[in-house]
Image: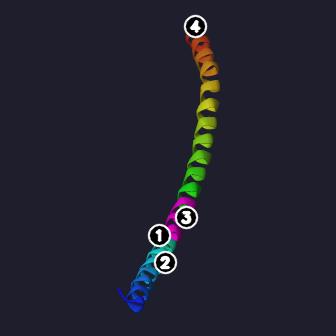
């Protein structure tokens, strides 16, 4: 195998590696953007869950009062 042939083969492999590297960089950028988007969605859902949990707890706190008031009205 001639020296020029070996250099050409190495050059082709380097070019293929560079193309693959660029593809991986683009894929990584897309995946990073997706991770950021999903993290924002997760944070939003956690916030909504916290608000819903607070509303449910507030409603549960009112239940005994409503039941006690209803019992007294029924007995009167």
**Circle 2 Cα neighbour tier, 10 Å, few/some/many (<14 / 14–19 / ≥20):** few
Circle 1 residue: 27
Contact, mark 4 vs mark 1 (Cβ under 8 Å): no
Q: In the rendered image, which quarter is residue 46 located in?
A: top right
CB under 8 Å between discs 4 and 3: no
**Residue 24 appears at what percent x and percent y?**
48, 71
Q: Is residue 8 left or right of residue 35?
A: left
Name the image quarter holding the C terminus. Answer: top right
Tell me which numbered mark, 2 or 4, is placed earlier along the sequence.
2
Q: Which residue is mark 2?
A: 22
Q: CA distance from mark 4 to mark 1?
A: 71 Å
Q: Which residues are magenta?
A: 28-36
Looking at the image, is 51 positioned above or below residue 31? above
The mark nearer the N terminus, 4 or 3, is 3
Tell me the element at label 2: helix
Which is more foreground, mark 1 or mark 3? 1
Number of marks present in the image shown: 4
User: In the depicted view, which residue is nearer to us: 42 or 16?
Assistant: 16
17 over 64 or under it: above or below: below
**Is 30 a magenta residue?**
yes
What residue does disc 3 label? 32
Tag 3: Cα neighbours inside 10 Å, few (<14), some, or many (≥20)?
A: few
Task: Verify CB contact (< 8 Å) between mark 2 and mark 4.
Answer: no
Query: Which residue is more in the foreground, 76 or 58?
Result: 58
Residue at 62% x, 41% y: name it: 50
Secondary structure that dominates the magenta span:
helix
Q: Relative to the observer, which residue lies in front, 1 or 54?
A: 1
Label placed on residue 75: 4
């Amino acid at each position: 195998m001639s020296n020029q042939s070996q250099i050409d083969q190495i050059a082709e492999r380097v070019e293929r590696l560079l193309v693959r590297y660029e593809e991986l960089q683009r894929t990584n950028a897309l995946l990073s953007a997706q991770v950021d988007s999903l993290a924002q969605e997760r944070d939003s859902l956690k916030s909504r869950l916290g608000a819903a949990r607070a509303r449910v707890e507030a409603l549960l706190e009112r239940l005994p009062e409503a039941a006690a008031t209803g019992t007294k009205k029924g007995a009167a």
